[in-house]
Image (spheres, rainbow, N blue to C red):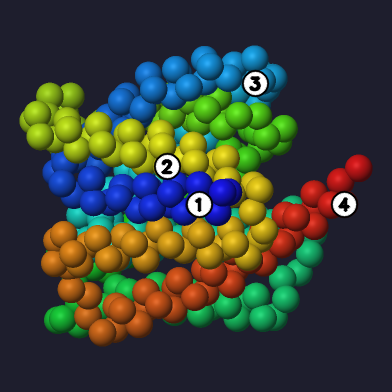
Amino acid sequence: MIHVLALLGVLSISFSAIFIRLANVSPVTATFYRAVYGVPVLALVWFASRDRDDRNRRERLLAFGSGLALAVDLNLWHESIALVGAGLGTVIPNTQIVFVALATWMRRGERPRLRTVAMIGVVLLGVALTSGLARSDAYGTRPVAGVALGVAAGFCYAIFLIVFRASNRGLVPPAGPLLDATLGMAAGALLCAAFDSGFAIAVSREAHLWLLALALVSQVVGWLLIATALPRLPALATSVMLLIQPVFAIFWGVLIFGERQSVVQWIGSAIVLAGVASLSFEVATAAMADKAEAP
């Protein structure tokens, strides 16, 4: 049952980039409405389970702060999607695992193994290939810039993950931490609005519908299912489940928008996903070892 919940959650968030493209609004506008439409529903879910939410003030502030990082991540990611499409735009931010791995090694005071360093190099090679290497057949309006923004989004996403996990060490019901993070995301979007010349509160009715779908399907349903299921899965299953999102996103991009990556970009995507799978497994295994050693 847990595997089914995780799969449904990953499938839900795989539509995020699709909803973003269909809404056709500016990056910060999409982030803002994703939060605004998600908060009331998350508040209702949290209210039903508030008796089990025993987080202290510091943990709540950490969750809110993680939402600020998530807002920057989403703003960069949304712009990346506009430049390289929904499929590649979802693959590249998965480089977050490189930054999470580096943070894990620094925290543990360990030197990464040669194999792991080599795998990071392989991921970076894959990222370079996804840019299309400035070839004329590369998919995207500005693929090199789109990939660069995707990597920057991955860095911000890594910050969000690290801080968000620190805000919920007791594994309380996920609605509370996710609600606080989503409130932080709304605040972060407003802080970033000045840097987005296309930011607008007034958008078309059709855009509102796609943004509502983004909030309900991805921010609420998807994240609640993932936050419930992944902590209960083995490390290998976690790594595999998280890779399903970009694979589905590539499929949706081809099916709905006719996105056609070049051969070089396809090879790069495959390399990135394989490298991310390997690094995800190592990081998840290290996290489980830390938990086992804790008194």
Q: Horizontal and vertical percent for residue 157? A: 48, 48
- What is the total number of numbered labels drawn onto the structure image? 4
Disc sitting over residue 4 in the figure: 1
Q: Secondary structure at mark 3?
A: loop
Q: Earlier in the sequence, mark 1 or mark 2?
A: 1
Query: Does the image show residue 130?
Result: yes
User: Looking at this rendering, what residue extends furthest in the front direction?
Assistant: 1
- For disc 4, the marked residue is 293
Name the mark nearer the viewer: 1 or 3. Answer: 1
Task: Mark 4: give few (<14), some (14-19) or many (20+) Cα within 10 Å.
Answer: few
Q: Earlier in the sequence, mark 1 or mark 3?
A: 1
- Horizontally, is 43 left or right of 107 in the view? left
- For disc 3, the marked residue is 53
* Amino acid on which the number 4 mark rests in the picture: Glu
Q: Secondary structure at mark 2?
A: helix
Vertical placement of residue 290 versus 26, above or below: below
Q: Earlier in the sequence, mark 2 or mark 3?
A: 3
Q: Residue at x 56, y 32 (%)?
A: 174
Name the mark nearer the viewer: 4 or 3. Answer: 3
Marks 2,3: beta carbons within 8 A:
no
Disc sitting over residue 222 in the figure: 2
Marks 1,3: beta carbons within 8 A:
no
Task: Mark 3: give few (<14), some (14-19) or many (20+) Cα within 10 Å.
Answer: some
Marks 4,3: beta carbons within 8 A:
no
Q: Report, in whole angstroms, how far the alpha carbon at label 4 lies from the one at label 3.
A: 26 Å
